[in-house]
Image (tube, rainbow, N blue to C red):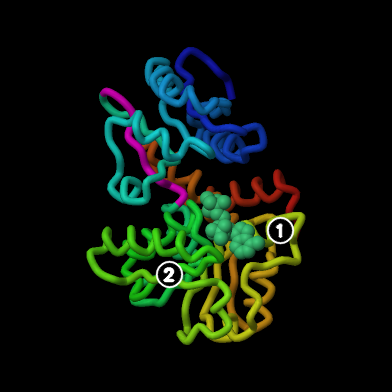
Amino acid sequence: MDINGTTRVCGLIGNPVAHSISPVIHNRLAGLRGDNLVYATFKVEAGNVAAAVKGAYALDILGLNVTVPHKQAVIDELVDIDELAAAIGAVNTLVRTEGGFKGYNTDILGLDRELSDVGISLEEKCVVIIGAGGAARAIAFLCAGKKASEIYIMNRTLEKAQNIADAVNEYAKKDIAKAAGISECGSFDKKDYIVIQTTSVGLHPHDDETAVTADEFYENAAAGVDIIYNPYETMFMKLMKKHGKPAYNGLKMLLYQGVAAYELWNDCKISSDMADIIYEDMKKELGISE
Ligand code: ATR
């Protein structure tokens, strides 16, 4: 692609950013579609978020992704925010609008798209979220938005799970979310629940670990998604499969958060054929063969 006087710029702000896969996703999408757009990474220190966002707008940057540790801090610099992103309290995508950037949370749109891709609907389902960090919080709001019947947030530290449950119940205006201790998973008395694994347990190089070990918990589940994608098949997924349940990793979530951001920036729709090409590129880039 030629970079010329009309090339639009998008990018990623965060710290660190050097190993991000986002440039692969967006530059490849631009190439496939023939869009005159480049995507670069910008390392931004904690005290510089406001200056970075203002500067990006002044430089006519089309859109930004935001990663750790700025997903909350960036909210103060927006002129508008998507309703779900505001409820979650985290923004990973800034879209250029009149007078400033509007914030979205495409991490969550990414998971939503992965779930529909693999045929999992949350509507009227019991969902168990393992973990109570930032990812779990966002996913709990998605579950509420997708009309899950019950949401259990199961965490080692009960208080953190309770905080998320309280916030979700306030958002949903009914008591659908409950906190549970991870040590209780063996005696969890529900059936046919969807499990979403959001802890860092099992992340490479700790491939043989999982936050949930009780066989009964897997036996009673319907399907599982691990937001980890390295390893490609986590111990959580292996245990789900051992009990005959379908299990998926987080690589499609990562793909679709990028696709959703690209679509917002360029007001376009990425075809599933194109998304499949990017998915293969990501696997190549991450050294995944299977
Ligand atoms: P993120 O923002 O990416 O979701 P995070 O905020 O660091 O990540 O949260 C990590 C989650 O993994 C937390 O729920 C954490 O449990 P605690 O709240 O009890 O700390 C969970 N986690 C990390 N290591 C764990 C372990 N060894 N066993 C069980 N849960 C663990």
263 w.r.t. 142: above or below:
above
Q: Residue furthest left?
A: 173
Q: Amino acid at mark 1?
A: Pro
Instruction: Single out the mark in the foreground, 2 or 1.
Output: 2
Q: Amino acid at mark 2?
A: Ala
Residue with the mark numbered 2: 179
- The quarter in which the N terminus is drawn is top right
Residue with the mark numbered 1: 231
In the shown orientation, is residue 148 left or right of residue 257?
left
- x and y percentages locating residue 126 in the rendered image: 41, 77
Classify mark 2: residues with Cα within 10 Å, few (<14), some (14-19) or many (20+).
many
- x and y percentages locating residue 107 in the rendered image: 47, 49
Residue nearer the viewer, 188 or 86: 188
In the shown orientation, is residue 224 left or right of residue 147?
right
User: SS class of the residue under badge 1?
Assistant: loop
Cα separation, mark 2 vs mark 1, equals 28 Å
Q: Which mark is residue 40?
A: none
Residue 101 visible in the snapshot: yes
Residue nearer the viewer, 257 or 142: 142
- x and y percentages locating residue 142 in the rendered image: 38, 60
222 w.r.t. 205: above or below:
below
Residue that appears at 50% across and 69% down: 154
92 w.r.t. 157: above or below:
above
Q: Residue furthest top?
A: 5
Q: Inspect the magenta stretch and tell me whether residue 103 lies in it.
A: yes
Residue that appears at 68% across and 61% down: 202
User: SS class of the residue under badge 2?
Assistant: strand
Region rendered in magenta: 99-107
* Label 2 CB sits under 8 Å from any ligand 1 atom: no
Quadrant observed for ligand 1 in the rendered image: bottom right
